[in-house]
Image (cartoon, rainbow, N blue to C red):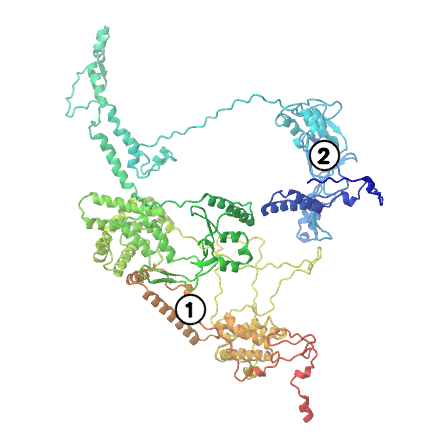
């Protein structure tokens, strides 16, 4: 139902009338916003108008707001007014040079003004540099007062542009100014009256290479490009034309300002950025629009048509050709340098035709009749001329024309072999056979075949989630929000999300990490989502690894279930040197050895025995020699299998000796064989005498020792040669000598250079290890120009050096005299006479010594180790103890006067006097020292601490019985540990380990880490309280007097710390009377 309401004006009346006065101009604080208000408004307007705004977008907008805040607060400086200064600051043109006025040369006397400055008496004069600068010559002196003085280094010319001079400005020095705010400023301060007195009267304008397109009449520079002169005292910036004038008159109208216009602009030192827009449009009109595009240029790239080597050629060479290598380079890298190609071409030459073979039997000898030139050459008619022969001077015979023709036919086959059916293949066969000898053995790498498995399918939704996680522009909360939008309709199963096909999408722990749960409370996150598996934190539900911040106990077992390694304490990663590094590197070279060749096996075992690692290229050189020599021996066909193995072993021994004597650098064996010294010199490198061959003898000894370690543990082909070395060493030695002679012939260059390197002895260079410390004086210690006292020689006041070498043997401190042969003293040298220094030794009086010894050691100190050491040691040991005790108490509150007296006694006591008196003097001095510190608890505690922690005190106080007991205990523990670990191995592992230990290439069974574990087993020595002290009888604060001591200083406790009062609370120490805690008792006195 519709209702219509009508209002009648008569029903309303005006109760009150209001008048509004509108302000025409609003206040300034309302018209202008502050910087923060504008930035806030910018932030609000930049936020995207959508339902959910990502935090990354907020961060990006906030970063922009912060950037604007920094710009307007720190970079932009607000000013009341401003103007754009587009004037030139400098002009750099080479065709405009200043003109010098008239001047006269002034004479300069080096003898009177310059040379006296280098006198020995003036070398240390204060402010020497200004004096030296003022004394420098100034050759130019201007006449008159016209012109502008030169203030910097300038090149000037005369009014004709000739006779240039180089005038220097005043010298400058750097001075530092420190401002009130602490900042520093460095300025160049000129020295007055140190520059040349040259005045500029104008400028000379040289002829310019480019004409002026629009000359400006009346202008000295823009009127013409010819040479001209400007006589003026004004600066160059006022004389030089402005940029607008240069662009208007000196630059032509062109459409190419970057090439054609740049030539004119560079001439007047004008850059394109300095030209105003109006002048730019006037001088450089725009280029007409190109309607038709230009035809593109066709670039012809060079083609690299590489012809691959033939299959036949690649089949002969072992190295394969690849497309990235030039065929010629591939041929040059072969063993024969590509000579096989020429042999192949020569073998195929018979396919292009063969000349008839010459007669195999002997030809009949033709006898020509004797004749004369006239009879032989007839010229009566043409027929006789054709039938005439040739006269030969050697036999004076006439050779008919048919005879000469027959000789020319026979000359083609002269001294040439006939081409047979087997000639072509035989040319290649001989070369290929020789090539195979020099080629390294071919290693065929078998491709390992893996079982193919079908890849697990990945959901498309999972790919989208991975893309979101990899988006660096999104913050973790944004990534979580985007992922939740994708999976909002999926129900999680066991805290994991799967798609309709059952494929994994994401786990809830990932969303928790993105939401910041792990950063907020790591412990709670680990308890809820993770568990430890093999020292990794993994998710309980999806088994995904989260991080690795957990150390876990692990154990390794072998195939038989035996415990290999127990990681009770996690070992730290460290670099392992020595034997383990050698074994690893030698195992890497194992691939280059042929196990079926006895020579290769011998080289490998000798390298293992000597513990040396050769360079692979030099090793391959001798291994290839073994193969070539072995092939030559097999080619004879007279050797059986054992004979081949024997000679292969002989060649292997020879190759090992050659490798040891020629390797660069020389290989130094890291182990010895019994008492024999390992020498690698002698035959065949250093001498031709085969009896002087220590390298050969040591190799045979090494093989013999290897056989003794395992008499029946070798197989063929190595067993033959090592058995012959043991049973018939002389035969093996003779065969190796023959092989070494052949080896030296094949490698002459290697042996010659190795001999030169072995004969060269490098001289040892003595290095000076004495470094004098540099003492830098304080800035306030000396003043500029202040002269100290006269220089005097320093004299040593003490009788001998403070740092004394205390020993029972006299040290050897003499040095070798330098070789001065061939050197002569200077003419100005002065002979220095040595000065005899008398050292005054002092020694206490015998009565004083008896008095000091009678004081005895204070028993209340409870320093029994020091007491026993003093009573049972000699004077030198006691002096060392006293020196160390003084070093300990020197940093504490020990009186300096007493310290100086004790130091003086140590430095000046005569230790070469009667040994018993010297011992008693030092012992008595020690007693005096301990009586001095008897009441100083702080010093006594320091000495007790040093007895436990100071290594010098420990070495002094340690007895022989205690050190022997500790060494025996440690040795026993190490031996039992090694024995236990060997028992844990299997029988085969134990035998192999024992063999490796015997030859010195086994890994360490007992390491440094094991010794650290044993060291931790030793109990830490702690002090045990006295039995007669009851803890309940100890007063508050210990046995220390409270309050202030007699001299007014504050009291310290037994640890050397300040005792502070309780500031007015119960038991306030400051308010207690001193007598209350003193040893005095008034009531006892009252009773008395």
Q: SS of the residue at dot 2?
A: loop
Classify residue 315 as left or right of residue 791. left
- How far across and how far down the image is residue 151, in percent? 73, 39
Which quarter shows the N terminus? top right
Which quarter shows the C terminus? bottom right
**What is the quadrant of residue 977 in the picture?**
bottom left
Residue placed under numbered mark 1 in the picture: 1014
Residue placed under numbered mark 2 in the picture: 86
Crowd band around label 1 with a 10 angstrom C-alpha radius: few (<14), some (14–19), many (20+):
few
- How far across and how far down the image is residue 1039, in percent? 60, 80
Observer-nearest of 26 and 417: 26
Instruction: Please indicate, yes or no, whether residue 768 appears anywhere in the rendered image.
Output: yes
- How far across and how far down the image is residue 258, in percent? 62, 28
Observer-nearest of 176 and 20: 20
Q: Determine whether label 2 and label 1 are within 8 Å by CB.
A: no
Residue drawn at x 52%, y 45% as measured from the top left: 471
- How far across and how far down the image is residue 213, in percent? 68, 22
Observer-nearest of 587 and 720: 587
Nearer the N terminus, badge 2 or badge 1? 2
**Against 1027, is 177 above or below?**
above
Tell me the distance, in whole angstroms, between the alpha carbons under discs 2 and 1: 83 Å
Classify residue 1068 as left or right of residue 290. right
Instruction: Please indicate, yes or no, whether residue 160 appears anywhere in the rendered image.
Output: no
């Amino acid at each position: 139902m519709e209702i219509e309401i009508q209002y009648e004006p008569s029903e309303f009346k005006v109760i009150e009338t209001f008048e509004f006065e509108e302000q025409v101009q609003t206040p300034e604080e309302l018209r202008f916003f502050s910087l923060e208000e504008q930035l806030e408004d910018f932030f609000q307007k930049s936020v995207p108008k959508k339902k959910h705004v990502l935090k990354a977008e907020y961060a990006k907008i906030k970063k922009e707001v912060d950037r604007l805040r920094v710009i307007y607060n720190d970079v932009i400086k607000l000013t009341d007014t401003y103007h754009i200064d587009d004037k030139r600051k400098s002009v750099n043109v080479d065709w405009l040079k200043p003109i010098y006025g008239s001047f006269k040369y002034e004479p300069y006397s080096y003898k009177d003004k310059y040379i006296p400055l280098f006198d020995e008496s003036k070398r240390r004069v204060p402010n020497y540099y200004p004096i030296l600068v003022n004394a420098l010559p100034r050759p130019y002196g201007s006449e008159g007062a016209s012109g502008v003085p030169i203030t910097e280094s300038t090149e000037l010319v005369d009014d004709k542009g000739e006779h240039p001079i180089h005038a220097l400005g005043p010298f400058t020095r750097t001075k530092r100014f420190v401002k009130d705010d602490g900042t520093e400023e460095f300025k160049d301060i000129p020295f007055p009256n140190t520059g040349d007195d040259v005045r500029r009267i104008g400028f000379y304008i040289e002829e310019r290479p480019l004409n002026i397109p629009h000359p400006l009449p009346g202008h000295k520079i823009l009127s013409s490009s010819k040479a001209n002169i400007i006589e003026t005292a004004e600066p160059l910036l006022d004389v030089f034309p402005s940029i607008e004038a240069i662009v208007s008159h000196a630059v032509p109208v062109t459409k190419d300002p970057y090439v054609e216009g740049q030539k004119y602009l560079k001439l007047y030192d004008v850059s394109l950025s300095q030209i105003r827009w109006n002048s730019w449009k006037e001088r450089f009109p725009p280029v007409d629009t190109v309607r038709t595009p230009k035809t593109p240029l066709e670039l012809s790239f060079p083609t690299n048509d590489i012809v691959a080597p033939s299959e036949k050629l690649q089949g002969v060479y072992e190295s394969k050709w690849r497309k990235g290598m030039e065929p010629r380079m591939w041929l040059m890298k072969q063993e024969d340098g590509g000579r096989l190609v020429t042999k192949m071409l020569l073998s195929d030459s018979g396919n292009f035709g063969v000349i008839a073979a010459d007669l195999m039997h002997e030809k009949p000898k033709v006898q020509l009749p004797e004749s004369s030139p006239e009879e032989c050459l007839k010229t009566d008619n043409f027929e006789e001329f054709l039938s005439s022969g040739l006269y030969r001077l050697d036999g004076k015979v006439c050779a008919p024309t048919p005879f000469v023709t027959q000789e020319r036919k026979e000359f083609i086959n002269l001294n040439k072999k006939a081409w047979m059916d087997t000639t072509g293949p035989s040319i290649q066969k001989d070369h290929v056979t020789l090539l195979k000898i020099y080629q390294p053995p071919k290693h065929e790498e078998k491709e390992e075949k893996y079982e193919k498995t079908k890849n697990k399918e990945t959901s498309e939704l999972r790919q989208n989630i991975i893309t979101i996680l990899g988006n660096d522009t999104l913050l973790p909360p944004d990534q979580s929000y985007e992922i939740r939008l994708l999976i909002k309709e999926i129900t999680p199963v066991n805290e994991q999300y799967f798609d309709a096909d059952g494929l994994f999408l994401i786990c809830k722990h990932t969303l928790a990490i993105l939401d910041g749960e792990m950063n907020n409370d790591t412990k709670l996150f680990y308890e809820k989502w993770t568990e430890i598996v093999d020292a990794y934190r993994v998710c309980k539900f999806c088994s995904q690894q989260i991080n690795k911040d957990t150390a876990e106990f692990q154990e390794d077992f072998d195939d038989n279930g035996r415990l290999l390694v127990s990681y009770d304490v996690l070992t730290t990663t460290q670099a392992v040197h020595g034997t383990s590094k050698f074994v690893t590197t030698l195992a890497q070279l194992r691939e280059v050895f042929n196990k079926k060749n006895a020579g290769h096996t011998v080289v490998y075992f000798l390298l293992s025995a000597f513990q040396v690692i050769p360079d692979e290229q030099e090793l391959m050189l001798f291994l290839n020699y073994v193969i070539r020599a072995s092939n030559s021996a097999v080619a004879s066909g007279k050797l059986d299998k054992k004979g081949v193995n024997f000679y292969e072993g002989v060649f292997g021994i020879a190759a090992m000796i050659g490798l040891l004597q020629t390797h660069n650098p020389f290989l130094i064996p890291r182990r010895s064989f019994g008492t024999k010294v390992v020498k690698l010199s002698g035959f065949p490198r250093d001498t031709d005498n085969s009896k002087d061959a220590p390298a050969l003898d040591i190799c045979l000894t090494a093989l013999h020792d290897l056989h003794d370690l395992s008499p029946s543990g070798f197989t063929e082909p190595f067993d033959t040669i090592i058995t012959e070395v043991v049973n018939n060493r002389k035969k093996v030695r003779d065969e190796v000598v023959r092989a070494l002679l052949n080896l030296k012939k094949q490698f002459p260059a290697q042996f010659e250079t190795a001999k030169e390197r072995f004969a060269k002895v490098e001289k040892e260079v003595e290095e000076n290890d004495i470094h004098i410390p540099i003492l830098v004086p304080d800035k306030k210690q000396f003043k500029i120009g202040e002269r100290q006292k006269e220089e005097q020689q320093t004299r040593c006041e003490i009788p001998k050096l403070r740092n004394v070498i205390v020993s029972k043997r006299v040290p050897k401190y003499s040095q070798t005299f330098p070789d001065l042969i061939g050197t002569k003293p200077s003419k100005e040298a002065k002979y220095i006479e040595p000065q005899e220094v008398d050292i005054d030794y002092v020694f206490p009086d015998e009565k004083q010594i008896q008095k000091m010894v009678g004081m005895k050691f204070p028993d209340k100190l409870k320093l029994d180790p020091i007491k026993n050491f003093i009573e049972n040691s000699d004077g030198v040991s006691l002096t060392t103890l006293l020196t160390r005790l003084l070093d300990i108490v020197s940093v504490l509150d020990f009186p300096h006067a007493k310290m100086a007296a004790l130091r003086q006694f140590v430095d000046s006591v005569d230790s070469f006097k009667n040994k018993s008196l010297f011992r008693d003097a030092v012992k008595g001095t020690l007693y005096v020292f301990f009586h001095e510190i008897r009441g100083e608890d702080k010093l006594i505690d320091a000495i007790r601490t040093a007895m436990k922690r100071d290594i010098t005190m420990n070495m002094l106080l340690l007895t022989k019985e205690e050190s022997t007991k500790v060494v025996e205990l440690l040795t026993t523990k190490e031996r039992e540990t090694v024995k236990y670990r060997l028992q844990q191995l299997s029988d085969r592992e134990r035998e192999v380990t024992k063999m490796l230990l015997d030859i010195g290439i086994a890994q360490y069974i007992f390491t440094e880490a094991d010794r650290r574990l044993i060291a931790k087993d030793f109990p830490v020595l702690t002090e045990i309280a006295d039995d007669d002290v009851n803890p309940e009888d100890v007063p508050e604060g210990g046995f220390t007097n409270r309050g202030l001591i007699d001299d007014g200083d504050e009291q310290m406790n037994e640890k050397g710390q300040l005792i502070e009062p309780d500031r007015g609370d119960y038991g306030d120490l400051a308010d207690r009377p001193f007598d209350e805690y003193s040893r005095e008792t008034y009531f006892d006195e009252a009773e008395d």
